């Protein structure tokens, strides 16, 4: 999984929780700029990513599993629509 994919998942998770970028930054003990940099450019240190994952109540493995479930769901829909 690329860093951009992880960044998109973090953003989706944050939005699902109804958190602003500022709220996530505060909960993770990071700057708003760090969250914006992750979401906009896919750039973030591993340490910051771990803090984000802890703040949203997930770990990196859970985020990867979520991504895999989303991909399988889309694949299943495509099989139904285009047998």
Image (cartoon, rainbow, N blue to C red):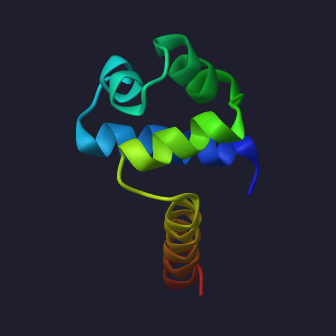
Of all residues shown, which one is farthest toward the left?
18
From the viewer's side, name the closer residue of 29 and 78. 29
Q: Position of residue 70 (x, y in %)?
A: 50, 66
Query: Is 81 situated above or below 53?
Result: below
Query: Is 70 situated above or below 78?
Result: above
Indicate the quadrant where residue 1 lies: bottom right
Indicate the quadrant where residue 8 lies: top right
Indicate the quadrant where residue 19 lies: top left
Of all residues shown, which one is farthest toward the right?
2
Of all residues shown, which one is farthest toward the bottom?
83
Q: Position of residue 58 (x, y in %)?
A: 42, 57
Query: Is 59 situated above or below 74?
Result: above
From the viewer's side, name the closer residue of 11 and 75. 11
* Quadrant in the picture for the C terminus: bottom right
Figure label count = 0
From the viewer's side, name the closer residue of 1 and 79. 1
The residue under the point 36% across, 46% down is 56
The residue under the point 54% across, 12% down is 33
17 to the left or right of 6: left
The residue under the point 43% across, 48% down is 54
The residue under the point 30% across, 23% down is 23
Q: Position of residue 48 (x, y in %)?
A: 59, 34
Q: Position of residue 39 (x, y in %)?
A: 57, 28
């Amino acid at each position: 999984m690329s860093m951009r994919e992880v960044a998109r998942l973090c953003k989706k998770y944050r939005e699902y929780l109804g958190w602003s970028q500022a709220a996530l930054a505060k909960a993770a003990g990071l700057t708003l700029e760090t969250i914006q940099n992750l979401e906009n450019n896919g750039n973030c240190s591993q340490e910051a990513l771990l803090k984000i994952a802890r703040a949203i109540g997930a770990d990196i493995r859970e985020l990867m599993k979520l991504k895999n479930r989303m991909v399988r769901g889309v694949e299943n829909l495509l099989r139904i629509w285009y047998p």
